[in-house]
Every structure is written in C-alpha cells, then in structure tokens.
Amino acid sequence: MSEMSRRKVLLSGGALGAAGALGLATPAWGTDEGPRSVYDTEADPVSAQLLDSGVVPEVNRLLWDWTRNDQPLPAGLPGYLHDFIEKARRLPEWADRAKLETAARFNKSRGIYLNLLNGVGGGMLSTAIPKEAWAVYYSKGGADMEDRVAKTSLLGFAVGALNAYRPDGDCIVQAVKTRLVHAAIRHLLQQSPHWKWGIPISQEDMLVTWHTLPTYAMRKMREWKVPISAADSQAYLHVWQVTAHMLGIRDEYIPATWAAANAQSDQVLPPNMGPTREGVELTDILLGQLAEQTSPGSVSRPLCNALARYLVGDQVADWDGIKREPIWGPLIATAWPALVRFREGLIPLPLVPEAAWVIDEAARQYILFYLTKGKATKIEIPTINRPE
C-alpha cells in the first residue's frame, strides 16, 4: 500500500507538519535528528542500569505501594532512580491547574465517549501500528494480554480521573512508572532473538500512539456532533499535553493546538500504520476480552467486532483482521449516532452528568476488576521479554 493511500485512512485535518509544543520549535520530521531517532535520554540509562544490576524485582517491591501523586518515595531505592523519579514527577512549568480541573470536569461529563474511544478505538488503532504491535507482542506483556491491558488501563483511567493531577490522584505515578517501563522495553527487546526493528518506542512512536488517544477521540466526538465548548476542548488537549510531557515526550514535539495536533496526526499516523500477523493476533485477544467484559458467558463477539469496525473504519479493521458483521454492523452505524443525540439531549437536565459519571465510573471499575481477576495490579518494570 502506498503512503498516499495510507494517509487517506484517517480523517484529514489540515496541512502536514506541526508546530512544536508551546511554539518552541518545529520537529525535524524524517531527519536523523528528528523524533524517529530520538528516545528518552533520561529514563533509558536508569532502566538499563536497574536491569543490568539485577535490582528490578526489589525496586518493583518498593514501588508497589507508591500510589499517590504527593506521596514521598519509599526508602531503599537506588540513588540514581530516586533522583530520576523526583525530577520526572514534577509537572512542567507550563502546566495550567485551572485547565487540568476543567479537563477533569469534561472527562466527567463525556466519560462514556472517552472510555469507548480511548479503550476500544485506541486499542484497535494501536494493533494496526506495526512497530507498536511488534513491541507489545515480543515484550513480556504480549504473553499475557489481560495483564498488559489492565496495566495500560491504569494510566488511561488515571488521565481521565477527577483527581488526575491533584495531590491525591495517581496520574503522575502511573506516567512515571510507564516511562520506566518503556525504557526497560527498549533495553530488553534489543536482546530478543525475535526483534529485528532497531530501537523501539522512539519519540515518534510515542507521538503516534498519543494521536490514537486524544486526537482521535476529539475528532470522533466532533464527527458525532458532541457539543464541546472551546474551554473544554482546550482543557482536554492540555491534560494530554501534560501527560505527554510526563511520559517523556519532548516539549518541542508536543502539539500546541488542536490544529497542530490534527496536522501532526496526519503526518505521522498513516505512514506508520498497516497489517501485521502480530497485530491481528493481538486484536483477536483484545476483542475476545471485550466480549467477555461486555457480557460474560454470552456470545457477544459479533457485537464487539461491529463496534470496533464502526469506531476505526473498514481499512484499519481489515488490517486488524476484524470480521464484518452483516447484522450488527448496519445496526450500530444507525443506532450509535441516535444514541449520542439522545444522550446529549439529556445532559443539561439536573443530575444527569452526575448519573452519567456514576455509570461510566462503574464501567471502568468493572473492566479493571475483570482484567485483574479482582487482584491488585500495578505497573511494574519488566525483567524479561516474551517467554519463548
């Protein structure tokens, strides 16, 4: 498939190219100095040293109960790790507390869409990104996708929580732990006999994934004609800008506006997408899990197939090996827009946003409970690749 045809896969959104975050710079896309060949110069040596010295199991044990944004680090961590986390946990100077609070309220009222788009939609897009599908499949998490999805959900749900970046929230904790995990995967995968794609999880790779979340979600909500104020739109972008920074994406690569985000998405997403055997296998596992979550014990996979295809479109669904469902497909395509209109007509009524949040939060907790089998789950630094 040509690069031009891939560019048509996702909704277009302006000219190619993107302004750097906060207007600092324009990324040198496609050059040796650009985000494709830049990684995480601060986290990478930390995770490598942890792995090479054999202390990761003890570090994971010590960090198990580090769960709140304002919580002091536990005693006993290696000094270089302690110093890294203390620096990495600081919000950027440009973080706007008022916008973060507005984003929390927006997530509260639009959780039903965001959970669906970030969870199902983003998940299906990610398995159609070869470098991401390979990195997931051949790392430790690829052998236990329920555990992998549960741990990924911890970060996603943390971003959407009401207290995401408040002192009693946990978004900073989940982001810093994820950053260390990414660095560990970079170190480990290059030692795998199955890995043949250079250094994984570059700055560009992280941005590609980032665009399958906020950029994709905002575009779909606009497509569904969900009413979103300018303040809410900017706040939602801001919470994800802050999250990108906390995950180790350089500020100059983070889009400063929605126009820049749409343009950057059009530049980096389509040429990085396509089919892989690993992506198809991961998709099958993910949709099987979704079917169980939706209606345990029943035959709900056709409904999940149709929903996934509706969310990401036929091209991505074909790359992912998602079956076409002649009955459920047309039904969802007709029913979902009507459901959105019905729901949005209710939003202004008293107590409806509160009730919607309770339902959305209950669904989030149910998903996490199902994926973790009711056991405590935390993001941990891996020590191995996918078992042979």
Image (cartoon, rainbow, N blue to C red):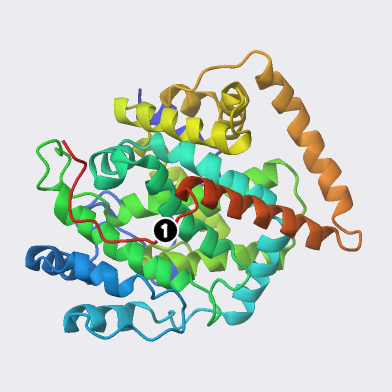
Q: Is the residue 62 above or below the residue 305 in the image?
A: below
* Count of numbered circles on the image: 1
Left or right: where 96 falls relative to 107: left
Q: Which quadrant does the C terminus fall into?
A: top left
Left or right: where 31 falls relative to 304: left
Left or right: where 218 falls relative to 109: left
Within-10-Å neighbours for mark 1: few <14, some 14–19, many 20+: some
Left or right: where 100 falls relative to 346: left
Q: Is residue 312 visible?
A: no
When asked about the image quadrant of residue 246, the answer is bottom left
Q: Position of residue 62 (x, y in %)?
A: 28, 75
The amino acid beneath tag 1 is: Thr
Q: Is the residue 244 above or below the residue 9 in the image?
A: below
Q: Which quadrant does the N terminus fall into?
A: top left
Residue occupying the point 38% across, 41% down? 145
Q: Position of residue 331 (x, y in %)?
A: 73, 22
Q: Is the residue 11 above or below the residue 256 in the image?
A: above
Q: Is residue 272 visible?
A: yes
Q: Nearer the viewer, residue 383 or 282?
A: 383
Residue beneath label 1, please? 377
Residue occupying the point 75% across, 49% down? 226
Q: Position of residue 297 (x, y in %)?
A: 59, 29
Q: Position of residue 56 (x, y in %)?
A: 19, 66
The kind of secondary structure element at disc 1 is loop
Residue occupying the point 49% across, 26% down? 317
Q: Nearer the viewer, residue 257 or 282?
A: 282
Q: Is the residue 375 above or below the residue 132 in the image?
A: below
Looking at the image, the residue that sits furthest to the right is: 349
Residue occupying the point 47% across, 29% down? 316
